[in-house]
Structures are given as C-alpha cells and as structure tokens.
Amino acid sequence: MRAVRFHDWGAAPVLDEVPEPVRAAGEVLVQVTAGGVSHLDATVASGDFELKPALPYIGGVEGAGTVLEADADSGLAPGTRVVLRGGGLGLLRDGTWTERVSVKRKAVTPLGAPLDPAVAASFFVPATTAHVALHDIARIGRNEDVVVVGAAGAVGAMVAQQALAAGARVTGVVGREDQLADVPKGVQALTLDDAEGLARDRSTSLLVDTLGGAGLVGRSRWVRQGGRAVVIGYVAGPHVELDLPSWLLDEVALLPVNMIRQERRAREVSGDLVRRLSEGELTLAVEEFGLADAPAALAALRGGRVRGRAVLLPG
C-alpha cells in the first residue's frame, strides 16, 4: 500500500510502500478517496507544533473515503461515504495521505449528501468557519454591507458566498489583480490597492478579515462606528499594534474566531453545509494532486499558490 510519510521534521514528505492497516475493535477501515492538504499539516510537519506524531508518520489531518469494514454496532455499513477528521489523524497517529486507513469511530462522519471526494475531504474548515464567523460571532443581519478581506481564498470565498446567501451586500478584497477572477459571483471585487474608498466612505457594517497582520487596524477603519471586524486568520502576520485612544474613537469591535473552541458547533452545522454544497448553492475551489506530488502540493500551499484547497488523490 502507498502512503506519503514524513521522515524528518522540516523535510519534504516521501511516497513509501507501507503495510496494510489492521483494523482494531472500535475502529473503521476506510478506502481513502481524497486527503486534504492544510496549513495544519504544514505546521505539524515543521516540528514546531505542540503535537508531534512519532516519525515516520503519514500526513493528513482530514480526508474522505468509503467504509470497507466496521463494527456491527457502528452504524457504518460497507460502502458508506464518509468524511475523516479528528481522532488524532495526522497529529497523534497516521493520517489520510494513504490508500487505506483504520481510524477511530469518532473520526468518521457519514456524508448526508453526495459530494466530489476532493470537496468532501476539504470543505469542513472553510465552510464551517464561515458559518460560525458570520452567524455565531458576527450575528449577521439582512441588508448589511459586508467586506471580506481575502475573498479569493478558500475561507474568504466561503464567507463571501454565505454572506450573500444571508442577504448581505458583499465586497471582496484581494491582494493581487490575478485573484479578482477567483472572487465568487455576485461579490464586488477590489484589490487592496483600490480599496481606499472603503476608508473614506465607512459604509461597511461588518468586516471579515482572513489576513491579519499589521494592516488589520487600518482595515477595521473601513467599518462605520458601532460595526464589527471579525478576525479569522493571520496569514499576513501574527502581530498588530493597537493605539487604544484611536480604537476607542473608531468604536469598531474586534471579534476573534476560535474554531478550536467551536469544534462542536462546526460539526452541528456541517450537515446542512454538505447539503448546500451538494446542491450547488455553495462552491469550493479545489486543486488536485497525486500522492507522488505531495511535496509540490505542500510547497504551493506554503507559497500561497493554491486556488482554494489542495487535496491528494490516492487514485
């Protein structure tokens, strides 16, 4: 059986021949159809993360597949299409970058509607993060003026789509002109260089920011007084300097999204998001790579060159 493993921290992964997994009681044997490639995978592989699997280990903290074998009382018949996530996958035990894997029952969620394997393997984080950010943190209302920073990325594009579906008027801001085409339909698209008017007008009631970094406070001033700025990520940098007198005068609430604490809520809403993806109401861009191309997928992810999400296809 083929699997993509890391042999050293910070090194590129290697496609290896490994023994077939042996299913233990309480586990589910799954034929993997797609393994997601995420920033968490890259962080774990660096060796700087708190959780460190024993080397060598198979990467992949999420994926999708088909049940081959499970306990009689598991509720999972052979042939059931499932999403793989949790249970220590890719963190405390081998992950999804392989042809077959045996996982704990709690890491297996049946798909309630048909999805392409690549989408099934990678929708959970962007789709549930967008839902929680908009509905649970920001409490979005109809007819709001929403600006999404990073609207061409997987999370930002999902935020923009779900904000539109909630009845908002949405502007998507991207870093480069070549990303404008990746902003979802129905969203007004701007580059950061062309966004000066947002600061002048301050008509925005809600900002959803996936970039973070030193420019976050400046972008929060696109929001009118009494509005909210929801912060999802920090790909532009982990630090920001806040001048308290100016912030108090601006009167814009900075609201963090902590999806680790929101994991249960994310699982609650994921079923409806699967339905909406299956019916085409929501879309997710995915770039597909073979197992042998795992180093290229990771390099593209780290370099910000992935359109949407990256996945490895064992087939």
Image (cartoon, helix red, strand yellow):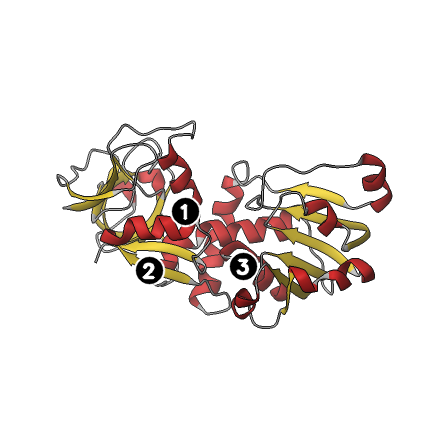
Res. 288 mark:
2
Classify mark 1: helix, strand or loop: loop
Q: Label 2 neighbourhood size at 10 Å, few (<14), some (14-19), many (20+)? A: some
Q: Is residue 77 above or below residue 9?
A: below
Residue with the mark numbered 3: 158
Which residue lies at the image location 54% right of the left edge and 46% below the top edge? 235
Residue at point 22% right, 43% down? 14
3 or 2: tag closer to the N-terminus? 3
Of the numbered discs 1 and 2, the one sitting upstream in the chain is 1
The reply to whether dot 1 and dot 2 touch (C-beta < 8 Å) is no
Instruction: Say what amino acid the circle numbered 3 marks.
Output: Met
Vertical comparison of 162 with 130: above or below:
below
Where does the image place residue 306, in percent across and percent down from the top left?
43, 57
How far apart are labels 1 and 3 at the CA level? Answer: 16 Å
Q: On the rendered image, what quadrant is the C terminus found in?
A: bottom left
Residue situated in front as seen by the camera: 80 or 174:
174
Above or below for 222 versus 59:
below
Residue 233: image x %, image y %? 57, 45
Residue assigned mark 1: 38
Q: How far apart, in angstroms, are the residues tagged by discs 3 and 2?
A: 19 Å
